[in-house]
Image (cartoon, rainbow, N blue to C red):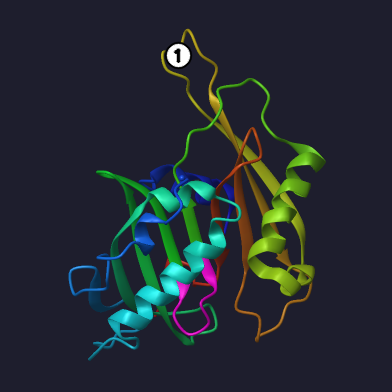
Amino acid sequence: MKAKSFAASALAAVFLLSATPVWAASGNAASTSVYAKAEVSKASKKKAKKNVLSAEAAEEMVKNKLEELTEIVPQLTDYRIDSIRESVEKDVNGNKITVLVALLFDQDYLIAHLKLNAETGEVIIFDHNSESPNTDKPLQGREAVERAEHYLDFFLKDRASQFEYSKQYTYVLTGYPEEELPGKPFTLVTFTPKEKSENQPIKSANVLLDANGELHRYLVDIFPDFDEED
């Protein structure tokens, strides 16, 4: 995935500390209103008959992953799970993959988006719409790479060593009021597999950081481009 197109998608996406996470509180049990029936992408071209996971199993997987993510985004404990949706898609190698998509809200505002591999629980996408600093000094160069590597290690663990730095791209959201504040710079750092193989479903791993090095998006690109779909 090209850096500019990824940055554009990050901009287009609508996108946390209590003793008990909001999503773990009693009374927030899984229900049909939270866990939607399976959907199928164009890539699969077949109608899904039922969800792969039960509502309880799906919610448990999402909550367990959120618990892990609080290590790097503590504020997640303040958010509620608005919905969990199951979807059947295809990876870049043409293999079917079932994913769980969870949306988290802070009161009435969509604040985070989580996409998991429903079989392994691995994170495919994590978006977090937190505050970012207004500054003329974006995170760049080796400092940006090292910070992104920290998150890469968190998400991919031992598999992170299979990836190498590829490139980085910085863009700026204009300050408001524009004449009074500098913009909000974001740096996208992309890693690619050291070795190409048909068994490697990840085309790239992408980390979006603000000027303070805080994570705003993590994405592993495992899906075919639109023009590659059947």
Mark 1: give few (<14), some (14-19) or many (20+) Cα within 10 Å. Answer: few
Say which of 201 and 85 sits in front.
85
Residue 90 x/y as whole percent: 44, 81
Residue 185 x/y as whole percent: 58, 31
Question: Disc 1 on helix, strand or loop?
Answer: loop
Residue 27 x/y as whole percent: 24, 65
Mark 1 — residue? 178
Quarter-of-image position of residue 83:
bottom left
Query: Which residue is located at x 66 percent, y 30 percent?
Result: 138
140 w.r.t. 99: above or below? above
Inspect the image, locate mark 1, and give the three-letter code of the amino acid beneath it.
Answer: Glu
Say which of 173 and 213 sits in front.
213
Using residue 29 as the reference point, say whether residue 131 is left or right of it: right
- Residue 229 in magenta? no
118 w.r.t. 126: above or below? below
Quadrant of the image containing the C terminus: bottom left
Query: Which residue is located at x 72 percent, y 62 percent?
Result: 153
- Residue 117 in magenta? yes
Using residue 41 as the reference point, say whether residue 146 is left or right of it: right
Residue 46 x/y as whole percent: 28, 88
Query: Which residue is located at x 30 percent, y 86 percent?
Result: 54
Query: Which residue is located at x 56 percent, y 64 percent?
Result: 68
Using residue 213 as the reference point, say whether residue 115 is left or right of it: left
Q: Taking the image as drawn, is residue 54 in sight?
A: yes
Please provide the residue range marked out in magenta. 116-124
In the picture as drawn, the residue positioned furthest to the top comes out as 179
